């Protein structure tokens, strides 16, 4: 497996990456960093959640480090264009994080619309090493010459297809016209519509092409199911799900390190072989836990998100989300631990009432409606009804006639209660015996 230290990055950046808790580079980082360190142009097909920000920020920082100089007033050495304020702020944050050991401190600035001009003018007057901007406001500053980019060395267009959707194509071309011809250009896009291909053809010179599977591709191969539960019943339901013989190698995700330890202990006590792996364990403990899991001595690995990033084990049959992640992209990373190397896999998420807004975010990001089974007690359901704002899907009914989602299909369906609470909605016309096609996932309308 490629390590960050194999990629040719300076030590100062490797330290920052370690501080951020990254253990191994993501596929886009492995593919993009080496050609970018050679100052090549790059066309990247990747979306948020793949680690693409570090894939471009780290080699750009390496370039800055190799030739550190005081920026000229009004100028920037690197220009990153992003479609939204939020993304611009996030990218700048990432540059700061990866450049945290640079001395003097890295000069990073953000220029976006909808905020006062004055602070932006002051910031530009000092000169920047990295400027992250949305196109509209940047053009204004270029027009008044408060910002000058004729010496800018690197241009990054992030989420180019999104910028196109927002009507930024003309502003982008105007901005590019003010950049020097001799520069390094990177273009990232989740999709490649004709206009983006045209833009790439005009802007990039002999680019390296990198592409990582879009989120949907991974998601699509994993059979997913949600079990609505009362918080207090989670541990026992997890043990029950583990009784399914098809769960031969599973990863259980928790949000916290303490949670990982507790869940592992509970599983062990219930006779399910489990080991926890997280940042508080020593390197040796982690290696031992992982080796045991790979060999098949340990059936279940309980992990936090960070700890699981570097886990590359084939044959993981199931991923269980004991708790849903705060960031929806993490859901995609988590379930991608199964379905590796083209295989299919199963992901089961235990979701208590408080987590339903998180579930909704996940469904939005992955553009799917997850089938579910309702295992809440009547009291838990009543509580959800009393606080509908804490649930993503207000429930229409409760009690014995509790609605539930489409049943999981295939051999590895969750081992559900035999207490008659596993009611199933009729199959949708699009759902055949195998996995239901996206967009045709059956659901109980009253739940959504
Ligand atoms: P991005 O696709 O750039 O938005 O990154 C998605 C998330 O993954 C961010 O929260 C990053 O901090 C995190 N991340 C990026 N690279 C890695 C890595 N190699 N290991 C673990 N986490 C990472």
Image (tube, rainbow, N blue to C red):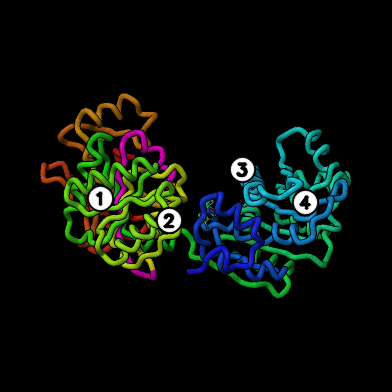
The part of the chain drawn in magenta is 341-362
Give coordinates of residue 31: x percent, y percent.
57, 69
Q: Is residue 229 visible?
A: yes
Label 4 sits on residue:
129
Disc 2 and disc 4: Cα gap in Å?
Answer: 36 Å
Q: Earlier in the sequence, mark 1 or mark 3?
A: 3
Give coordinates of residue 58: x percent, y percent.
64, 58
Identify the mark at residue 406; answer none if there is no mark. 1
Q: Answer yes or no: disc 4 within 8 Å of ligand 1.
A: no
Foreground residue, 436 or 258? 258
Which mark is nearer the camera, 1 or 4?
4
The answer to whether marks 1 and 4 mark residues whose Cβ atoms lie closer than 8 Å is no
Q: Is residue 440 left or right of residue 77?
A: left
Element at label 1 = loop
Quarter of the rendering containing residue 404: top left
Disc 1 and disc 3: Cα gap in Å?
Answer: 35 Å
Q: Earlier in the sequence, mark 1 or mark 4?
A: 4
Which mark is nearer the camera, 2 or 3?
2
Confirm whether the magenta stretch covers residue 259. no
Q: Earlier in the sequence, mark 2 or mark 4?
A: 4
Indicate whether 379 appears above or below 107.
above
Label 2 sits on residue:
283
Q: Earlier in the sequence, mark 3 or mark 4?
A: 3
Which mark is nearer the camera, 1 or 2?
2
Label 3 sits on residue:
86
Q: Earlier in the sequence, mark 1 or mark 2?
A: 2
Disc 1 and disc 4: Cα gap in Å?
Answer: 53 Å
């Amino acid at each position: 497996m490629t390590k960050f230290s194999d990629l040719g990055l300076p030590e100062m950046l490797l330290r920052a990456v370690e501080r951020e808790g990254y253990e191994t580079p993501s596929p886009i980082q492995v593919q993009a960093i080496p050609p970018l360190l050679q100052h090549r142009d790059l066309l990247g097909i990747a979306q948020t959640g793949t680690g693409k920000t570090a894939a471009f920020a780290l080699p750009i920082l390496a370039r800055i480090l190799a030739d550190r100089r005081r920026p000229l007033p009004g100028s920037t050495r690197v220009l990153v264009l992003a479609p939204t304020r939020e993304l611009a702020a996030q990218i700048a944050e990432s540059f700061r994080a990866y450049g945290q050991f640079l001395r003097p401190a890295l000069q990073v600035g953000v220029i976006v619309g909808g905020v006062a001009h004055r602070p932006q003018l002051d910031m530009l007057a000092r000169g920047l090493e990295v400027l992250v901007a949305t196109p509209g406001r940047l053009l204004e500053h270029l027009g008044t010459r408060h910002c000058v980019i004729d010496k800018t060395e690197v241009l990054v267009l992030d989420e180019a297809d999104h910028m196109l959707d927002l009507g930024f194509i003309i502003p982008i071309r105007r901005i590019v016209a003010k950049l020097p011809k001799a520069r390094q250009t990177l273009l990232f896009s989740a999709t490649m519509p004709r206009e983006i291909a045209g833009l790439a053809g005009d802007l990039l010179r002999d680019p390296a092409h990198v592409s990582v599977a879009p989120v949907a591709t991974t998601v699509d191969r994993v059979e997913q199911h949600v079990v609505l539960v009362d918080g207090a019943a989670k541990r026992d339901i997890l043990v029950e799900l583990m009784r399914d013989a098809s769960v031969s190698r599973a990863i259980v995700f928790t949000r916290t390190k303490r949670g990982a330890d507790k869940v592992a202990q509970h599983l062990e006590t219930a006779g399910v072989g489990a080991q926890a792996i997280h940042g508080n364990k020593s390197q040796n403990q982690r290696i031992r836990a992982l080796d045991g899991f790979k060999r098949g001595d340990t059936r279940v690995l309980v992990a936090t998100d960070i700890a699981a990033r570097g886990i590359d084990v084939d044959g993981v049959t199931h991923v269980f989300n004991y708790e849903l992640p705060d960031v929806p992209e993490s859901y995609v990373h988590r379930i991608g631990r199964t379905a590796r190397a083209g295989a299919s896999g199963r992901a089961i998420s235990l979701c208590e009432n408080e987590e339903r807004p998180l579930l909704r975010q996940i469904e939005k990001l992955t553009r799917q409606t997850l089938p579910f089974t309702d295992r809440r007690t009547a009291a838990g359901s009543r509580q959800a009804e009393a606080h509908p704002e804490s649930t993503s899907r207000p429930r229409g009914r409760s009690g014995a006639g509790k609605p539930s989602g489409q049943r999981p299909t295939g051999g590895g369906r969750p081992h559900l209660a035999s207490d008659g609470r596993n009611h199933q909605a009729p199959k949708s016309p699009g759902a055949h015996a195998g996995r239901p096609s996206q967009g045709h996932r059956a659901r109980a309308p009253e739940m959504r």
